[in-house]
Image: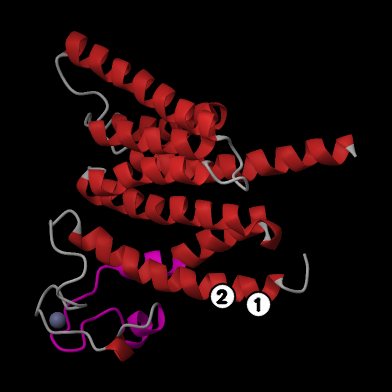
């Protein structure tokens, strides 16, 4: 840890809270097919505009007691949670890659920031919107062309193609044999984004971890109701776990070599 790290960490936390606020807008508006920019922040219940001084992440929610100032309708809990979670997730990325690798901090803050949006939308609406997963696939590839990236562009492309191809075939097989959709197309596109960001090897780890976490959490629940469960949140959580695990493993190996 060097002397730039603390001020930088504070900047990242503040940016995280601001982005969390923006991600809340995406979580609410994308499934409703509303414009992201217009109209500005407003209460979904009474449509009144929210002035900037009541739009400060975290503080405004607490100040207003989780209710609209005008009509007193409760503001959904995801607004507060995402504004707290985003800076924490960003700081986690910063902890892993540090100030000496800001390129990767940016890359993974982007990935996990929009990952949080996917986590919440999939949890609430059972969809992973193309407007997030498709640009993410492309972003992973674009980042791979920079020398500071952790995987080469060949591995990025290969990661995307292999993961997409494999799950597309599984989905097709399931559809043909069971006559119903087993894995949503949204899941497959998001897995392809994981592929272009992490490359084929780590993507495989992520998918294994996601299945393991999903099994542990979902098996007790499946006894009560047999229905489709959102896989997206597990993929996001598994990616985060693998990011931490992979980096610590990598640094252990390099420490041993020196
Ligand atoms: Zn209101």
- Camera sees residue 78: no
Reply above or below: 59 against 164. Answer: below
Residue occupied by mark 2: 11
- Is 37 magenta? The answer is no
Reply above or below: 57 against 144. Answer: below
* Residue drawn at the location 42% of the way across and 57% of the way down: 113
* Residue drawn at the location 72% of the way across and 73% of the way down: 4
**Which image quarter: residue 140?**
top left
- Secondary element at tag 1: helix
Work out how far the residue at label 2 is from the one at label 1, CA to CA, in angstroms: 6 Å
Judge from the rendering whether residue 3 lies leftward or rightward of residue 23; answer left or right: right
Reply above or below: 248 against 59. Answer: above
- Is 67 magenta? The answer is yes
Cβ of disc 2 within 8 Å of ligand 1? Answer: no
Mark number, residue 7 = 1
Residues drawn in magenta:
58-84
What is the x, y in percent for residue 119? 35, 49
Judge from the rendering whether residue 4 lies leftward or rightward of residue 189; answer left or right: right
What is the x, y in percent for residue 157? 45, 30
**Which image quarter: residue 79?**
bottom left
């Amino acid at each position: 840890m060097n002397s730039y790290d603390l001020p930088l960490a504070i900047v990242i936390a503040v940016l995280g809270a601001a982005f969390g606020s923006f991600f809340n807008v995406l979580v609410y508006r994308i499934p409703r097919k509303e414009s992201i920019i217009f109209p500005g922040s407003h209460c979904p219940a009474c449509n009144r505009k929210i002035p900037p001084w009541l739009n400060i992440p975290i503080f405004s929610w607490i100040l207003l007691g989780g209710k609209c100032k005008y009509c007193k309708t409760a503001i959904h809990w995801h607004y507060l949670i995402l504004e707290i979670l985003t800076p924490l997730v960003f700081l986690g990325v910063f902890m892993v890659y540090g100030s000496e690798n800001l390129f990767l901090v940016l890359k993974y803050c982007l990935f996990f920031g929009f990952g949080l949006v996917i986590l919440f939308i999939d949890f609430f609406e059972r969809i992973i919107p193309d407007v997030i997963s498709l640009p993410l696939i492309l972003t992973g590839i674009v980042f791979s062309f920079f020398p500071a990236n952790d995987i080469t562009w060949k591995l990025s492309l290969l990661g995307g193609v292999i993961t997409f191809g494999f799950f597309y075939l599984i989905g097709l097989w399931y559809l043909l044999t069971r006559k119903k959709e087993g894995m949503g197309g949204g899941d497959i596109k998001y897995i392809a984004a994981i592929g272009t960001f992490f490359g084929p090897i780590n993507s495989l780890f992520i998918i294994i971890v996601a299945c393991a976490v999903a099994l542990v959490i979902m098996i007790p629940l499946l006894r009560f109701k047999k229905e489709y469960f959102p896989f997206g949140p597990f993929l996001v959580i598994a990616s985060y776990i693998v990011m931490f695990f992979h980096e610590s493993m990598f640094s252990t190996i390099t420490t041993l070599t020196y």
